[in-house]
């Protein structure tokens, strides 16, 4: 099962790490407890829209950009899940225009890595 909170947490963590910022810095700027932000990043807590807005403001990232990245990750996770269910048949899906379409055949269900032009995207089937 694909957990949206886990994908969201992974994207938030990557955004923070790209900026070279600590959990403490972002939690302080977003006015959210360090422990709660950590749980959100680890996919253990569901973040409300208000909390996501505060975190996005602290990271200086538009919420639409965050959600777009989460949506792309969800599409890739669904692709990996489909490929794992039917390993003999290739599964193709359309993702963001920047990435084009991707096709996956006979992959282990645990982990798929798809290299995008800017960075590697890890997809984990939970």
Image: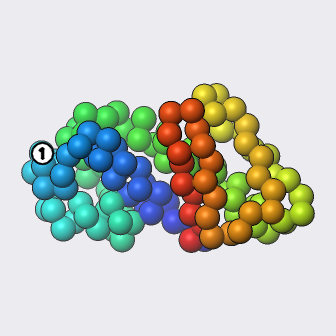
Of residue 14 and residue 41, the one placed in the foreground of this image is: 14
Eyeballing the image, is 43 above or below 91?
A: below
Q: Which quarter of the rendering shows the N terminus?
A: bottom right
Q: Mark 1, residues whose alpha carbon is within 10 Å: few (<14), some, or many (≥20)?
A: some
Of residue 76 and residue 21, the one placed in the foreground of this image is: 21
The image shows residue 21 at horizontal and vertical percentages of: 20, 46
The image shows residue 112 at horizontal and vertical percentages of: 63, 58
Left or right? Give the position of 89 relative to 112. Answer: right
- Residue that mark 1 sits on: 29
Q: Is residue 53 visible?
A: no
Left or right? Give the position of 70 relative to 81. Answer: left
Identify the colour scheme used: rainbow
The image shows residue 12 at horizontal and vertical percentages of: 35, 50
Residue at 76 percent of width and 52 percent of height: 104
> How many discs mark residues in the rendered view?
1
Eyeballing the image, is 81 above or below 113?
A: below
The image shows residue 51 at horizontal and vertical percentages of: 26, 52
Q: Is residue 25 visible?
A: yes
Of residue 113 and residue 94, the one placed in the foreground of this image is: 113
Residue at far right of view? 88
Q: Quadrant of residue 38?
A: bottom left
Q: Quadrant of residue 33?
A: bottom left
Residue at far top of view? 97
Residue at 80 percent of width and 63 percent of height: 106
Of residue 86 and residue 122, the one placed in the foreground of this image is: 122
Left or right? Give the position of 94 relative to 114. Answer: right
User: Which element is circle 1 on?
Assistant: helix
Q: Which quarter of the rendering shows the C terminus?
A: bottom right
Q: Quadrant of residue 98?
A: top right
Residue at 22 percent of width and 65 percent of height: 36
């Amino acid at each position: 099962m694909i957990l949206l909170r886990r994908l969201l947490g992974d994207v938030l963590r990557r955004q923070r790490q790209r900026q070279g910022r600590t959990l403490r810095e972002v939690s302080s700027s977003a006015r959210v407890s360090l422990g709660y932000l950590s749980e959100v990043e680890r996919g253990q807590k569901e973040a409300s829209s208000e909390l996501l807005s505060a975190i996005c403001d602290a990271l200086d990232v538009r919420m639409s950009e965050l959600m777009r990245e989460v949506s792309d990750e969800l599409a890739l996770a669904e692709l990996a899940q489909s490929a794992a269910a039917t390993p003999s048949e290739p599964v193709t899906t359309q993702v963001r225009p920047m990435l084009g379409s991707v096709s996956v055949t006979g992959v282990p269900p645990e982990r798929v890595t798809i290299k995008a032009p800017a960075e590697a995207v890890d997809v984990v089937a939970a």
